[in-house]
Image: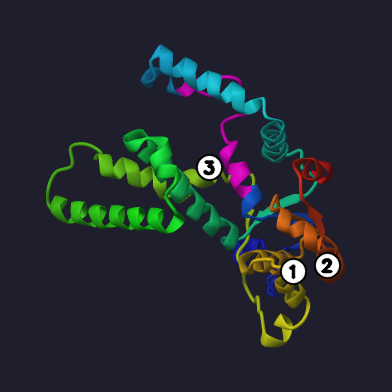
């Protein structure tokens, strides 16, 4: 069932326990620190970077790594990637979809800021960014139609933009998602009766629906720990422990403590 990861009921098999569930807030930080493990990560790109660009990249990475939280997430990545973790780190399709949403917006803003200035694009709302991304898809569809039957001579600018804003699965799994166990959600139910039980307390305390679903999925998988950097979870920490049987990890230090 699910490539030997899950039991028929949808729980992680015993060999993957104990496990910690990463919600999207932790997953995004984990994703962003990919490549920061080495002192000179620009070396593989030396042939396509001039000396100034390479130096700029090196300086910016040094600045990022001076941030305590980033250093700790890099340490988390290191423990997971080098097999030093004592627990299995799990993500779900919900975490993955939220990463895709974040990446599309962040990558588009990064590209657009080079064309129009950072201040202009950073002020755009998520809905406005969504409209821009929809336009990209329309342009891509038109380009594919026009190129039918023609010999491809190079990668187009539009293809480069799409490759940056739309995650490639094989690349993602070999890089940003490396070391994480991706678990399917099977035999998961959320009934009306269940909604009137502990999830109602989460809703009452203003936890968003996606956050509630993350908690319920982590419990369904059999995780012992639930990791999130979203401060909203601090309000429901005791409920997560009492009703869902999971310990909330809300900081890099706490995650490192169980790894």
Describe residue 93's horizontal placement relative to residue 105 as left or right. right
Please state the horizontal and vertical placement of residue 211, each as a whole percent of the image. Answer: 66, 64
Q: Is mark 3 on a helix, strand or loop?
A: helix
- Nearer the observer, disc 2 or disc 1? 1
Describe residue 125's horizontal placement relative to residue 87 as left or right. left
Residue at the location (50% across, 45% down)? 172
Query: On residue 174, which mark appears?
Result: 3
Please state the horizontal and vertical placement of residue 142, each as a whole percent of the image. Answer: 19, 55
**Label whose residue precedes the other's in the sequence (1 or 3):** 3
Q: In which quarter of the image is the C terminus?
A: top right
Within 10 Å of disc 3 (Cα), the crowding (few <14, some 14-19, many 20+) is few
Reply above or below: 23 against 109.
below
| CA distance separating discs 2 and 1 | 11 Å
Residue at the location (70% across, 81% down)? 195
**Residue that numbered label 2 is attached to:** 239
Residue 178 appears anywhere in the view: no
Q: What element carries label 1?
A: loop
């Amino acid at each position: 069932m699910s490539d030997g990861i899950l039991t028929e009921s949808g729980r992680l098999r015993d060999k993957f326990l104990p496990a910690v569930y990463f919600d999207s807030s932790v997953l995004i930080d984990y994703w962003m620190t990919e490549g920061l493990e080495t002192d000179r990560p620009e070396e593989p790109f030396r042939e396509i970077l001039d000396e100034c660009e390479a130096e700029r990249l090196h300086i910016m990475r040094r600045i990022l790594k001076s941030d305590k939280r980033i250093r700790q997430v890099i340490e988390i990545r290191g423990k997971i990637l080098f097999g030093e973790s004592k627990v299995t780190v799990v993500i779900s399709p919900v975490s993955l979809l939220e990463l895709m949403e974040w990446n599309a917006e962040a990558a588009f803003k990064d590209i657009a800021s080079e064309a129009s200035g950072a201040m202009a694009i950073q002020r755009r709302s998520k809905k406005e960014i969504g409209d821009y991304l929809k336009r990209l898809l329309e342009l891509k569809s038109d380009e594919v139609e026009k190129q039918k039957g023609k010999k491809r001579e190079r990668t187009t600018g539009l293809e480069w933009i799409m490759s940056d804003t739309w995650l490639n699965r094989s690349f993602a799994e070999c890089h940003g998602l490396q070391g994480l166990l991706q678990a399917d959600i099977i035999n998961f139910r959320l009934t009306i009766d269940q909604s009137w039980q502990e999830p109602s307390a989460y809703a009452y305390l203003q936890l968003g629906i996606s956050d509630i679903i993350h908690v319920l999925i982590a419990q369904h998988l059999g995780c012992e720990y639930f990791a999130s950097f979203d401060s909203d979870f601090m309000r429901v920490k005791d409920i997560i422990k009492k009703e869902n049987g999971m310990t909330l990890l809300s900081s890099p230090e706490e995650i490192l403590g169980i790894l």
